[in-house]
Image (tube, helix red, strand yellow):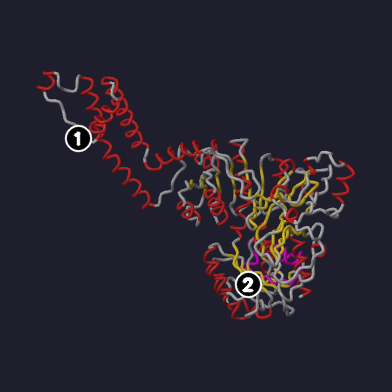
Amino acid sequence: MTSAGWGTLPVEPVSQHYIVCGGNALAHRLIVELVEHYEVPVVVLVPDRAREHAPQIEQLPGVAAVVEYSSLTEEALRAVRVETARGIALVDGSDQENIHAALSAQEHNPDIRIVLRMFNQRLGENIERLLKNGAALSGSATAAPAFAAAALSRPNSVQVGDRFLHIAYDDDIDSGRICIVADQIDRQDLTRIRLLPEQEGDSAPFVRLASEFGDEGPVRRGGAVGGLGGAGGGGEGRGVPAQREPEPEETGGVAALQALPSEPPVRIAWARRLRWRLLDTLRYFTSARLRLVLITALAAVLMAFGLLWYLNRDFGWSLYVSLLDLAGAAQPDQPADAASGAGTGGLWQRVAQVVITFCGITFAPVATAVMVEVLGSGRRGQHRNPGAGTRDHVIVAGLGNVGTRVVAQLHGLGVPVVGLERDPQARGISAVRALGVPVVVDDGPLAEQLRRARLQHSRAVVAVSGDDATNLEAALEARAGRPDVRVVVRLFDDNFARHVYATLDNAASRSTSYLAAPAFAAALMGREVLGTLSVFRHVLLIAELRVEDGSGLIGMNRHDMEDPGGVRVVAVRLARSPHTYQWNYPDRTQALVPGDRIVVAATRSGLARLNTALASEE
C-alpha cells in the first residue's frame, strides 16, 4: 500500500523493515532486490512521487509504503519510522545530504544498519568510521570497471587476494578455470542462459577419465583437468587431483570463472604511444599559427645545418657553429678575414649562419607566447580539445558520475580517452580536465560532436549519460559515422538491451543500477561484496563471508552452502592459515569453524537465500 499523501504515515504500522531513500534508477533496482530476493518489508522515501522512477516503485509488489518528502529531514525519517527499522539505504541526493541523513538515522536508532551512496570514496571511508554499523558505497565506482572492460573487449575482473577473477567464454576458457558459471548461451536469445548450472559429484570426473581415456588417452581442451590448473589450485597443495568440470551441453555457449595472476594488460605498442604523445603535446601547447612558425623555423635551421655540414664535411664543427648561431653568440667574419681567406669559407656558409641566427631570434618570443597562451587558457577554464595524435582512443559520452569513473579507469590503464559532454556545467568536466584528458563540450548535433572527438580514429564509444534514448542515439550515430566501431551503451531498460544485442554487432550494454544494486542490497544485509562480474546482462556477485562466533556458518560445509543456480564456493581461507587462499577447496565435508573465511560466486537470489539462511540460524 502507499501513503495517503505528502508526508503522511503508512496506513499500517511497520517495524523491522528496511528503508530506501531515493526515487532514481539505483533505488528502483535496490527495492526490487530487497522485495524479490531477500523478501523483506521495504518503506520507500521519495522526493517526488510523480518523477523519475517513483511511479514504477509504487507499483512494485512487496513495498510496504511510499512516503514523499522533498528532503531528508528529521520529520521525513520519523515518517518512515526509522527508530524501528533494521536498515536504511541512502542512494539519492548529494554526499553531504546523505551524510547528514545517516548521522540523523543513527541518532534515532543506534543499532540500524546504514548504507549510503557516496561519489567521494575517500570521504566515504572516513564516514564509515563515524557509523557504528554502516558502509559507504559508490554505485558509479562499482559499475565503471564493467564499462571500461566492455569498451576494451575484455572481461572485467574482481581482485581476490593476489588473483583477479574474470569471466571467459567458449574458446577463451583455459586450464585456469575455477568453475562453469553459465551455459546454454545464445547471443540471439539471452533468456536461455543458465547461471551456475548444477555440477557433478566429485567422483564423476575421475570415473569418466578412467573409462574414456585409460592411462594414456588424451585429454580434450574443453575437458582439461580443472581446479585452477596451471594457476595453482588448492587441490594440488593437498596431493588431490583437481576437479574436472562437466562438458558443456552442445546447445549454446559456455562461460567459466577463471583466475589470473594480474589483470590482462592493454596492448598498445610503446612507439605508437610515444608518437601520439609527441603530436598531442605539440598541439596542446601551441595554436595553429604558432605551430606554423615553429615548424617553418625548425625546417630552416635543419636545412642550414645540412648546408654547413655539406660544405665543411665535419659534423661536430657544423653542430658547434649551428648551436652558437642559434643562441646568437656566433662571431661574424670581418672583411679583412674574407679577403685573406681566413673567414668561414664562402658565401653559402655565411647565408646558412644568418638563417640559423634569425631563426634562433624567433624561438625566444614564440616560447614566451606558448607559455602565455597555456597559462591564459588555464585561467579562462578552456577545455582541451582532442589533438591530431589522438588515435585508438575511447570516446566516453556523458561525464556524469559514471562517465567520470569510466574515464579515470581507462586513463589509469594507459588508454587514450576523449570526453564528450553537452552540458558545460557537468560536474565531471573539471575532474576529467584534471587528468589531462581532452573534452569536447557542445550542445550541437551528436554527429558533429563525435566528429570533433575523432570518431574515425577511435577504438570504442561508451555512451553513459543518464538517459537511455540519448545513449542509444549516441551509439547509432557512432555506428553511422563508423560502422566497425565498438559501442558500449548504458541502458536501464531491458528491452533496449535485448535489441542492442540482437541487432548490433561488436556491441555491449550495461546497466549501472543493475550492477550496483546487488552490492548495495548485500551491504544492507551486512555481507561484504568484493565486486560484481557481468555475464551479458546478468550479474554474479563475488562475496567473502567471515565465520564468527554465533554465526550460522559454523558447522556448515561446501555441501551445505553450495546451491545449483545460486551459490558456488570458489575459495576458502582457514583460520589456521588466514593469508592463504585455497582455491576450489577440495574437502567438501570439513565443517567451518570461527575464523574461517569463504569466497563465493553467487547470483543475486543465491546470495539472498544464503543470507536468509544465516540470519535464521543466527
How far is disc 1 from disc 2 in space, using C-alphas? 73 Å
Magenta part of the chain? 31-60
**Disc 1 or disc 2, which is closer to the eye?**
1
Secondary structure found at label 1 = loop
Task: Tell me: 481 left or right of 288.
Answer: right
Residue plotted at (63% across, 74% down) = 133
Secondary structure found at label 2 = strand
Task: In this rendered view, identify the residue nearer to me: 444 or 501.
Answer: 501
Q: Amino acid at mark 2?
A: Ile
Residue corresponding to mark 2:
114
Q: Residue 265, located in which quarter of the rendered image?
A: top right
Task: In this rendered view, identify the residue nearer to me: 451 or 522.
Answer: 522
The circle drawn on residue 131 is: none
Residue plotted at (62% across, 48% down) = 149
Residue corresponding to mark 1:
329
Residue 355 at what x, y percent from top left?
25, 27
Residue 164 at what x, y percent from top left?
65, 53
